[in-house]
Image (tube, helix red, strand yellow):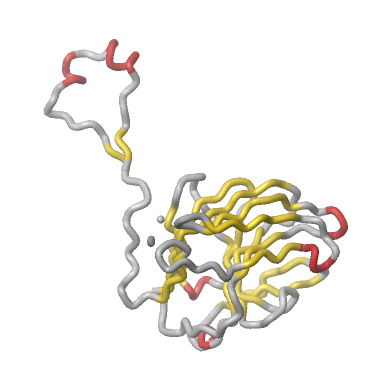
């Protein structure tokens, strides 16, 4: 369901290093990547692996006349979404959306998402309105690299974005536990409204 590697010293460095570098008493450094998830057994989990969630679907700017494209594929353990964002024809976004079913996340404090992303950065949307042009709670995700990462986001940091002139803008209104009682769907949307390719892969999303 749920998202360690040993560093090898370059051969040239070993050849030039003194004997103390090869001291067997000094262990090689180890970088820990993508530790095991820390969500609890009580977490609300959307798992594209073990639970085989396959109801998500693409929603591109073609709904408003744009020409961006996104292809959704379910791998053995993940959701894979890739394509191209285009600003032609007043477009500029692409997204992948979960099914419309009301969920209550008011008792949780954070959301964890195990993902890797290249190209376009994405935002996580907690939709409390049914349509893309209505107010939505949104958080812009920052991933440190193109490897697998577990991103932790406090739910209190989600902010209402209001679409004006076709572009979502922050309002300064932050999400409260009461707001989380009726979330209609989850969505991952490209955030830049700029031309470019993207590749997004998600293992799970967990509210905890």
Q: Residue at x 43, y 65 (%)?
A: 112
Q: Name the image quarter holding the N terminus.
A: bottom left
Please say if 44 is above or below 32. Answer: below
Please say if 40 is above or below 177. Answer: above
Question: Percent x, y for residue 189?
Answer: 64, 63
- Report the front residue among 38 and 54: 54
Image quadrant in which you'd find residue 67: bottom right
Q: Which residue is drawn at 33% across and 53% down?
A: 35
**Residue 110 visible in the shown view:** no
Image quadrant in which you'd find residue 71: bottom right
Q: Residue at x 55, y 85 (%)?
A: 102
Q: Residue at x 67, y 70 (%)?
A: 170
**Residue 144 visible in the shown view:** yes
Residue sitting at the far right: 89
Question: Percent x, y for residue 97?
Answer: 62, 69
Question: Percent x, y for residue 85?
Answer: 73, 52
Please say if 12 is above or below 71. Answer: above
Relative side of 9 to 184, left or right: left
């Amino acid at each position: 369901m749920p998202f360690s590697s040993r560093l090898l010293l370059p051969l040239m460095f070993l050849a030039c290093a003194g004997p103390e570098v090869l001291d067997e008493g000094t262990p090689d450094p180890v970088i820990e990547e993508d530790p095991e998830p820390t969500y609890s057994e009580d977490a609300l989990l959307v798992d594209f692996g073990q639970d085989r969630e396959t109801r998500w679907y693409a929603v591109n700017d073609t709904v408003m006349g744009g020409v961006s494209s996104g292809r959704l594929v379910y791998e053995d353990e993940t959701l894979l979404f890739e394509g191209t964002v285009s600003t032609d024809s007043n477009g500029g976004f692409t997204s992948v959306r979960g099914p419309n079913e009301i969920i209550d996340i008011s008792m949780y404090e954070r959301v964890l998402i195990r993902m890797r992303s290249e190209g376009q950065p994405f935002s996580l949307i907690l939709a409390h309105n049914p349509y893309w042009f209505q107010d939505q709670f949104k958080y812009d995700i920052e991933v440190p690299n193109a490897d697998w990462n577990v991103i932790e986001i406090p739910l209190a940091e989600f902010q209402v974005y209001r679409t004006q002139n076709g572009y979502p803008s922050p309002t300064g209104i932050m999400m409260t536990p009461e707001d989380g009682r009726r979330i209609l769907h989850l969505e991952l949307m490209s955030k830049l409204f700029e031309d470019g390719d993207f590749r997004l892969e998600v293992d799970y999303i967990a509210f905890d």
